[in-house]
Image (cartoon, helix red, strand yellow):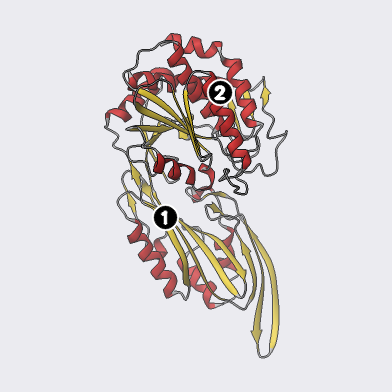
Amino acid sequence: MSEIREYLNAHKQEMTDFLAELVAVPSVQGEAEDGFPFGREPAKALEIMLKKCEEFGFIIENTDNYAGSADINGLAPGLAVLTHLDVVPVGSGWTSDPYTLRYEPDTDKLVGRGAIDDKGPAVAALFAARAVKELGIPLKKGIRLIFGTNEENGSADLAYYRKKHELPPAVFTPDGEYPLINAEKGMLRVYFSAEFNNGFIKGGEVINAVPQECTHDIRLYENGNVSMNYGGMHGTSAHASTPEKGENAITKFLHFNNYGLPLLMKLKELFPHGEFSGKSCGLGFRDEISGDMTCVLSLLYTEDGRLHGGVDIRFPLDRTKAEISDIICGKLREAGFDIDSCEGVEPHCTDENSVFVQTLLRVYEKVTGDKGRCIAIGGGTYVHEIEGGVAFGAEFPGKNYNMHCPDEFITVRELIKNAEIMAEAMAELCS
């Protein structure tokens, strides 16, 4: 509807000003306190958002500072739009204050932590709902906005909210990419260890990223003599769901500098440098929808006389968590390691032929003029454990928004475009 587009363009400055207000809150997870399960800053961002929703005439509820909701009318909700207000730490490399939203007129960029993930999309969802309400678009079902505060650190917010409230029958999150994500691989994270008295190894920072560095100080004992072997390997970081985009410094170390040590030799056999599918671990599965699985040895370090490791696995839709864990844990035990923990989630898939999905794709095509299609990913979105849920936006195809990186951004044009897409979706699904 042209009236939706006109409404949003008329409120463009108000949208960017409110995004600046949210970006100014450093809503990284902090220490839990009474009444503040993820620290005070995520709760502050939630308070600001709910106050704005109330100003717009929405019916708000704060669920114990885990999450909040806003209904645009008194009808039973038929649709929920799920966003989050917490952000990842800023890190280094920013060209300006990450908590001061910066507008670049020549590029149309709004730069700041949370601009694309997920404060910008949350603002777009808010103004989309406001447009539907104030334009008087007739609705037969209610629309609920849900704002979480712990998506970046495990989504305990959503789990708590769901214990208190039933979700509407249709849920989408603009915390992914267009056209629409309907399939997400299963995920498994395995931590293992074994006794190790041959010095120091430090590789990787987090389990869900291809390690960029691996340093070592290996001690070899022979005929009463000790030799010291220092060194380091450099790779290229990438998300663990797309390991082919990086170079694994740990497997590179094992390939070139394992010093004939049995444990390291075994790891080299299980995780050959340049292999991403887990084939050497007895995995290597694929299916037609989600494609090849991935398997990344992403952590390797020494501590208290033990060698510790971590593996991140993303497996296809036609496999189960139990099947994959039995295989990888069995191989690691055969190599001499103890399994310290093995946790994960099953794959997620929503029928691409459902009315919900087809309606969203039709709206995307109508607003953008581009072909709508379903895509499968190795990462997990905010709806991974919501039956029938999909990720719908907010990243447009082929663009890098520096998500989780320095100078994260969204453009003003795309902020408005996201709001227009969401408003049209709300109207289509709930009229």
Q: Secondary structure at mark 2?
A: helix
Q: On the rendered structure, is 345 left or right of 354? A: right
Q: Residue at x 48, y 21 (%)?
A: 419
Residue 9 x %, y %: 54, 12
| Residue 378 visible in the picture | yes
Q: Quadrant of residue 385?
A: top left
Q: Which mark is residue 359?
A: none
Q: Secondary structure at mark 1?
A: strand
Marks 2/1: CA–CA distance:
37 Å
Q: Which residue is mark 2?
A: 52
Name the quarter where the C terminus is drawn: top left
- As shown in the figure, which amino acid type bears the numbered disc 2? Lys
Residue 132 x %, y %: 43, 16
The vertical placement of 227 against 25, above or below, is below
The one of 30 and 358 positioned closer to us in this rendering: 30
Q: Which residue is mark 1?
A: 344
Q: On the rendered structure, is 135 left or right of 106? A: left
The vertical placement of 120 against 162, above or below, is above
The one of 431 and 162 positioned closer to us in this rendering: 162
